[in-house]
Image (spheres, helix red, strand yellow):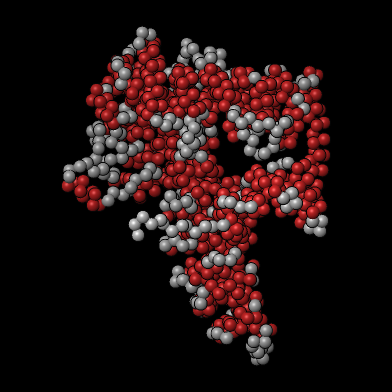
Amino acid sequence: MEGSEPPPLPQVSPAQLREEGNELFKGGDYSGALSSYTMALSLEATPQEQAVLYRNRAACHLKMEDYSKAEADASKAIATDGGDVKALFRRSQALEKLGRLDQAILDLQRCVSLEPKNKVFQEALRTLGGHIQEKVRYMSSTDAKVDQMFQILLDPKEKGTEKKQKASQNLVVLAREDAGAERIFQSNGVQLLQRLLETGETDLMLAALRTLVGICSEHQSRTVATLSVLGTRRIVAMLGVKNQSVSLATCHLLQVMFDALKEGVKKGFRGKEGAIIVDPSRELKLLISNLLELLTEAGVSAQGRDNALTLLIKVVPRKSLRDPNNSLTLWVIDQGLKKILEVGGSVQEPPEDIAVTENSRMSASVLLNKLFDDLKCDAERENFHRLCESYIKSWFEGRGLAGKLRAIQTVSCLLQGPCEAGNRALELSGVMESVIALCASENEAEQLVAVEALIYAAGKAKRASFITANGVSLLKDLYKRSEKDSIRIRALVGLCKLGSAGGTDFSMKQFAEGSTLKLAKQCRKWLCNDGIDSSTRRWAVEGLAYLTFDADVKEEFVEDEAALKAMFQLSKLEDRSVLFAVASTLVNCTNSYDHEEPDPQMLELAKYAKQHVPEQHPKDKPGFVRSRVKKLLSAGVVSALTCMVKNENPVLTNSCRELLSRVFLALVEEAEDRGSVVAQGGGKALLPLALEGTDIGQTKAAQALAKITITSNPEMTFPGERVYEVVRPLVSLLHLNCSGLQNFEALMALTNLAGISERLRQKILKEKAVPMIEGYMFEDHEMIRRAATECMCNMAMSKEVQDLFLAEGNDRLKLLVLYSGEEDELLRRAASGGLAMLTSLLPQLCIRITQVTTHWLEILQALLLSPNLELQHRGAVVVLNMVEASKEIAVKLMESEVLEILSVLAKGEAGPVTRAATACLAKAVEYELIKPNKERE
């Protein structure tokens, strides 16, 4: 009817939502219960109802290990009713986990006074009292230890003694514990550590820096106090000292300080006055400002400058693009972009104003790229371009040849990082012309700068075709006539890059047939020449990174074992700028880049429209790829990859990590190769790749871990605590955005892990994998469904999962019963195995089996009659458990054909099936449902 109002929505009361939350909590869905309680709190409820809801919500937070919120909610419940023992007990549990034992014991004492006969409260109070006494003893002994250690360290008579060395090591160990760090801090420790830093002795300085790491770690207020005492400028200046060990230790300390300032107190352990700095932006900016100043100071060591760049790469850009605040990046661009460009445009020769290493320019490129990627809009990007162009023009115009070289070097730095900014800089008036002109210079330094810029400029297809038309003859001339190896090899790389512009497309050849093979042969020759320094030889790898798009080049390269080993050796050296080129070459050789099969109809349509259709090289077919992988493995590729991952460096960018993950995945594709990959440290190297990097890179590394975990013993492959680190990457493969194969392999790997120990099952539970595993039990694909069922059966050994099966109102048990009657024999084996185990552990489920489906008896009979002995055994165990659980069920079973089947099975050959069948009949005799067989007796 027109104009009539819609009927009012049904009102939900707080009490209904509370009941709904209670049911969800019993079923193990703590986040769902939390949502229900929160929704109930948003409605109008009485103070008493609100107190109960806050108390229940505190229980959810405890289960989800969010102890700060648990404490807050329990406190709100107590504010309404001071005698609420449940709220008091929950708050005491949260406070204990937060390390505030003195407050926790007060709540427990109140619980005991309210309910003196409650044994749970009494036991908790006894345990907590023991913990407090232990802590008091530790604290009193720690005070004396701290004083004693500082006396030894600051005693001039003890110089260089073993006693002093031991004291410094003890101080570092003590600072790693929260209580120890707090005690050092409160014992005027920062001032005393400052005196150690001023001694100038390397060992004492390292001990002081490492102790400061413990004091500042994840503690914001202590970090601010430390910065105030030591001075931001002084700490950052220590980064630039010539002693590499001290510089690295300072770098670690600054990283910890940045983390503490950005994240705040994670552990809930508070400082001297429990002070927390709400907005640490002033301290952060002061630290970053000093780091930016350090980049261009003349007296700073080259290693220190690299460490400063590394810190800026780690701390300035946002960790996730989902974080809307990129103000720190914008501030760094405005305050320090020109300083970063100054490092990027520098050269290693001694006349240079600032000292740099072979990695400095690459680190500057990585930092520039991360800053550019962190920008959110066109206006921010335009500002970045404007600052870069302004800096390049300031050097290019009016500063003579030296200025032009500096400008071109800066453009090269941008082309290696934010290439969009580099390409725009190349289009500035006169820049490209100067590059071409300087290539013909007689001066080696000028030629080096110009040829490198030409190589980086050829990255864009449009510019590559321009250089192919105008610069190939120049590069050929440089290669043939130059007497300098450094020039010749760079010219060769330029030709390689132009020759590979067609990528993997067999039909797109830039040069005449055979030219790329000649170029590759020359690259391999340079690569194997030990007489040339490594910084020059790395350019040969750059050339191969481009040329190995061609399958003929790949085949020749993997046959040349000497060239492979020379490349692997280069990847292990200190010059890390070769990493990306090595990784790219290996991705090309293993064909581990993404390639989709074209739609046949679209292919025909493209041919009809006379559009270019990419063609696959005949030597890029699977058989050739497998052969190349075998040759790489025998040449020692895994040890090279492991070394590349292990040596953390800014050059090991997320893109580079993704390439390494792709190579590892290709290496473990065949089951027989996985053992050798693990033996050479491949499993250990994959863990950091699976936990950090691009989404694609992490997924590829996780899939490689899954493949390894499926076919090998995880405890041997990932010894000690490392096996627990594998769980998170595997669980990440269960997400819906992963492919079916990745889901399947993750489930198989988790099944293996879940069968090892309760601690591993607890780790899988903590990663919230169980709901996803359950979801895949309903999957249409039979292999995924079977793998999920097997995984769930292993997980059912945990009490938390058993509780899920016991919870009212779910179909988990029904699904296992029905799957035990499916046609897929492997699925039946998994489901019936789960039933056998659950009915053994939880006899109350036996009655529920008869209620979940009317077909339960047919399914059990089918299992007992199966020709497969494993299925027979599982069926017999389930029947035995049901008979032992209830006489009522036993009656139903003995009145059916099950009795006859069991009688036949009991007469069979001795084995587990016969024993289970005999036990069933014996129990039926005990119930007096059947009479004993006299003849058999």
Residue, far front: 3
Residue 473 on image: x %, y %: 25, 22
Left/right placement of residue 214 relative to residue 898 reads: right
The one nearer the camera, 334 or 142, is 334
The one nearer the camera, 774 or 29, is 29
| Image quarter in which the C terminus is found | bottom right
The one nearer the camera, 194 or 503, is 194
Quadrant in the rendering for residue 469:
top left
Residue 169 on image: x %, y %: 73, 30
Quadrant in the rendering for residue 885:
bottom right
Q: Residue at x 25, y 36 (%)?
A: 509
**How many numbered discs, if any?**
0
Residue 931 on image: x %, y %: 65, 89
Q: Is residue 664 visible?
A: no
Q: Residue at x 79, y 20 (%)?
A: 155
The one nearer the camera, 719 or 551, is 719
Q: Residue at x 62, y 62 (%)?
A: 803
| Image quarter in which the N terminus is found | bottom left
Left/right placement of residue 245 relative to residue 115 reads: left
The answer to whether residue 21 is above or below residue 625 is: below
The answer to whether residue 533 is above or below residue 503 is: above
Q: Is residue 78 visible?
A: yes
Residue 445 on image: x %, y %: 39, 15
Left/right placement of residue 237 relative to residue 374 reads: right
The answer to whether residue 577 is above or below residue 113 is: above
Q: Residue at x 35, y 37 (%)?
A: 548
